[in-house]
Image (cartoon, helix red, strand yellow):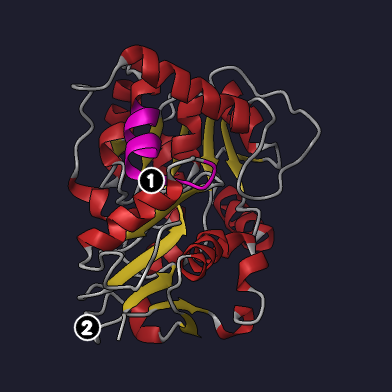
């Protein structure tokens, strides 16, 4: 009997997962498998798939929404920072993905091809000011030389990805800013929490200013962006701007990372002095390590990932596309 592809998504999305943007890859996988004659089931995403657990193999191929699990026949899928780009990974997603230990290397990257790819990304995201979450349409002027700090939710700390908490990060940035203006943007999914954190920092006497500016205005106008491990660090590459993180990520070789508050000032100096190849960085990460839903070879790349997991087309009972 052929192996099945089992998609683990939150129960409330079982009926309409194919029409949900945050499950777009899962919908594409389901359509591909069914078109080729395979079997697809939708199952609950249990707590074990979100806790770094080792899962037992059962002969089927499992794909877990925003998963963080490993085991024979288990893969994890989630949006990889930019809309349309995805992780499909046997280890985890985002900071927990298989790319976490890899170092950026320009060797073997064609500069002209990297530039074409990077400009394509700028056309898709930076120039139309498109981001993963809804952004302010009105343009905002950013003070020259500013440091843009982007707050996040609790996920980074819950998953053990943060080296410093939000309050400590804000203190470190102000202490090491060297007089630069510090703008702080709450996360668009939880602006109230972000504003509370900003008000608490201001009550301590920290010279920071809240902003609701479009993420692309902030990235284009600031000198550097700071977060725990936000997607803005990679979006900043579209604007050729450096990033500093206070948490672990799977793109650490593309940014500066602070493990303690005292790391910030030297990290800022290094970030501002560096002259990296942003186009090569974008190609290395997004073209070569992520799945692009718009790419003509998407299904071939998905099938290759399935094969590396031990599920060749014949094991899944798949015919030609």
Residue 45's quadrant in the figure?
bottom left
Q: Is residue 306 above or below residue 198?
A: below
* Label 2 secondary element: loop
Coordinates of residue 142 in the picture (x, y in percent): 66, 24
Q: Nearer the viewer, residue 165 or 220?
A: 220
Coordinates of residue 76 in the picture (x, y in percent): 36, 66
Q: Which mark is residue 57?
A: 2
Q: Is residue 122 left or right of residue 159?
A: right
Dot 1 crowding, Cα within 10 Å, few <14, some 14–19, many 20+: many
Q: Circle 1 sits on which residue?
A: 290
Coordinates of residue 258 in the picture (x, y in percent): 29, 42
Coordinates of residue 203 in the picture (x, y in percent): 60, 52
Residue 71's quadrant in the figure?
bottom left
| Quadrant assignment for the C terminus | bottom left
Dot 2 crowding, Cα within 10 Å, few <14, some 14–19, many 20+: few
Can residue 289 be found in the magenta stretch?
yes
Which residue is painted at 65% across and 28% down in the image? 217
Which residue is painted at 61% across and 56% down in the image? 194
Residue 52's quadrant in the figure?
bottom left
- The magenta segment is 281-294
Q: Which mark is residue 134?
A: none
The disc, 2 or 1, on the residue closer to the chain's N-terminal end is 2
Which residue is painted at 62% across and 63% down in the image? 193
Which residue is painted at 62% across and 78% down in the image? 13
Question: Magenta span: helix, strand or loop, mainly?
Answer: helix
* Label 1 secondary element: loop
């Amino acid at each position: 009997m052929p192996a099945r592809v089992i998609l683990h998504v939150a129960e409330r999305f079982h009926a309409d997962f194919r029409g949900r943007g945050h499950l777009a890859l899962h919908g594409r996988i389901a359509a591909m498998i069914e078109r080729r004659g395979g079997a697809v089931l939708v199952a609950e995403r249990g707590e074990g798939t979100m806790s770094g657990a080792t899962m037992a193999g059962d002969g089927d191929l499992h794909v877990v929404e925003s998963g963080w699990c490993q085991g024979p026949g288990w893969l994890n899928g989630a949006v990889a920072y930019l809309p349309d780009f995805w992780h499909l990974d046997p280890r985890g997603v985002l900071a927990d993905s298989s790319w976490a230990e890899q170092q950026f290397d320009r060797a073997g990257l064609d500069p002209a091809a990297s530039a074409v790819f990077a400009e394509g990304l700028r056309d898709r995201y930076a120039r139309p000011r498109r981001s993963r979450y809804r952004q302010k349409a009105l343009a905002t002027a950013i003070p020259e030389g500013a440091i843009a700090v982007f707050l996040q939710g609790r996920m980074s700390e819950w998953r053990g990805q943060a080296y410093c908490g939000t309050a400590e990060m804000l203190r470190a940035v102000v202490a090491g800013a060297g007089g630069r203006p510090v703008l702080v943007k709450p996360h668009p999914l939880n602006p109230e929490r972000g504003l509370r954190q900003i008000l608490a920092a201001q009550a301590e006497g920290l010279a920071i200013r809240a902003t609701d500016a479009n993420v692309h205005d902030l990235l284009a106008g600031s000198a550097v962006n700071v977060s725990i491990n936000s997607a803005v660090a990679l979006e900043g590459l579209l604007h050729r701007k450096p990033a500093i993180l206070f948490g672990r990520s799977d793109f650490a070789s593309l940014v500066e990372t602070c493990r303690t508050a005292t790391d910030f000032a030297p990290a800022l100096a290094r970030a501002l002095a560096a002259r990296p190849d942003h186009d090569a960085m974008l190609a290395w990460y997004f073209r070569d390590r992520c799945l692009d839903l718009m790419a003509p070879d998407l299904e071939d790349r998905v099938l290759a990932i399935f094969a590396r997991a031990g599920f060749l087309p014949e094991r899944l009972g798949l015919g030609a596309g």
